[in-house]
Image: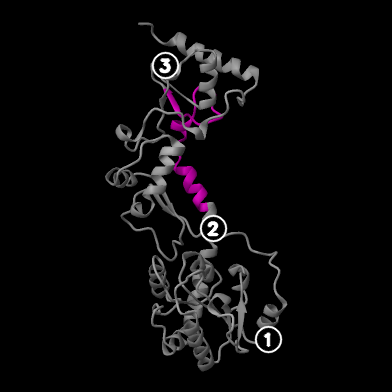
Amino acid sequence: MWTGSHRIVNDFRKNILGLLPLSSEQALHMMNDVPHTYCWSPSLVPKPNDWGPNIDVCGFFFLYDKTDYPVPRSLMDFLDSGDPPLYIGFGSISGHDERKLFRTIIRALNITGKRAVVSDKLIAPDTEVPENIHPCGNCPHDWLFQYVSGVCHHGGAGTTATGLRAGLPTIIVPFFGDQYFWSDIVEKAGAGPPALSARSLHTRHLVDAINFISDANVKARAQEISRKMRDEHGCEAAMRSFHQQLPLDAMQSDLEDTYPACYRIPKYGLKVSWPVAQILLGVESVFLDDLLPCATCEWNPAKSFNLSIPPLYRTPDRVLPYTEDQRKKIIAAFSDVINKVPQK
């Protein structure tokens, strides 16, 4: 994970948060303690027993149903004209021989007697399309999958989740990355056959896979997975996880708590937000040298922080989010703190 994302993370730390970049050793050590929320279904991949309380598995995230999709009349007519078809598509995957793949799909459908809605990315412009196939352009999967009997796709996490949530037995033809992982998960869950090879997809293999997902037991298993996934409510569970992991006491600004603390004033034992700091700076109650970055969670404080003003928490000097009365209360509260600090 770090190998693939370290440039993005370090760019964000340096240019947005005003922090020093992390080495691989620092990052790996810090990630052991950082709270994580994984957005996959615990019904498919339960949280391992050796993962600590800082890690939650909450369920897939789904967009709202696409009820406003302008359905092409030809597509609706095809869906209504016979038994529910299959859906076959490989997303935005490129670099494969679409003509060869499409010929394989045609032969497999003819042998099994199935119909299919096929992504138009698999159909070359001058290709003759048989009557048992309907080309499909950009179409919301959560809408289309209501009308099909099974799916064959590349195994992207989103497409896999949408198909299983719809209760559809699933054939996966992985091309790279986590697509192999999801094909294994679907197979182990009993909702689909072993992965098919994208480079050497033979008609016989696709026929066997279509027959596999046509089995009543496989369909029943896919429906069971769907029921469990619909009870998970991944977005809501992830928000609960996020808020439960927040160290609210450490984040709260002293003097006025509307905005999170991002600075410490060590000699007074205070942590304040940038708007509060602006007020104190404006009346020269403190100076920039008095402000040190405040780490909500100090994963590696010796090397992670340098003195800067995080632009995330900044507001323009002349646009403070407080009324005059609120400013006076903040200054008065700060004066009370100063008066309580023992004089050296």
Whether 88 is drawn above or below 298: the answer is below
Q: Which mark is residue 21?
A: none
Residue that label 3 marks: 268
Question: How far apart are the alpha carbons under marks 2 and 3?
Answer: 45 Å
Dot 3: within a 10 Å radius of its alpha carbon, few (fewer than 14), some, or many (20 or more) residues?
Answer: some
Q: Residue furthest bottom?
A: 111
Q: Residues within 10 Å of mark 2 (few under 14, many from 20)?
A: some
Q: Residue furthest front?
A: 126
Q: Quadrant of residue 206?
A: bottom left
Between the residue at mark 2 and the residue at mark 1, the CA separation in whole angstroms equals: 34 Å
Disc nearer the start of the sequence (2/1): 1
* Mark earlier in primary sequence (3, 1): 1
In the rendered image, which residue does mark 2 sit on? 233
Q: Nearer the viewer, residue 164 or 132?
A: 132
Rendering coords of residue 219 (x, y %): 51, 79
Circle 1 crowding by C-alpha within 10 Å: few under 14, some 14–19, many from 20: few
**Residues shaded magenta:** 237-264
Q: Is residue 145 left or right of residue 56?
A: right
**Residues marked 2 and 1 touching at CB (< 8 Å):** no
Q: Judging from the image, what secondary structure is the residue with disc 1 in?
A: loop
Q: Residue at x 44, y 73 (%)?
A: 95
User: How far from the left and from the top, in percent, is residue 250?
Assistant: 43, 31
Answer whether residue 262 is magenta in the image: yes
Query: In front: 6, or 330?
Result: 6
Q: Position of residue 61 (x, y in %)?
A: 53, 58
Query: Which amino acid is tagged 2?
Result: His
Identify the residue under disc 1: 81
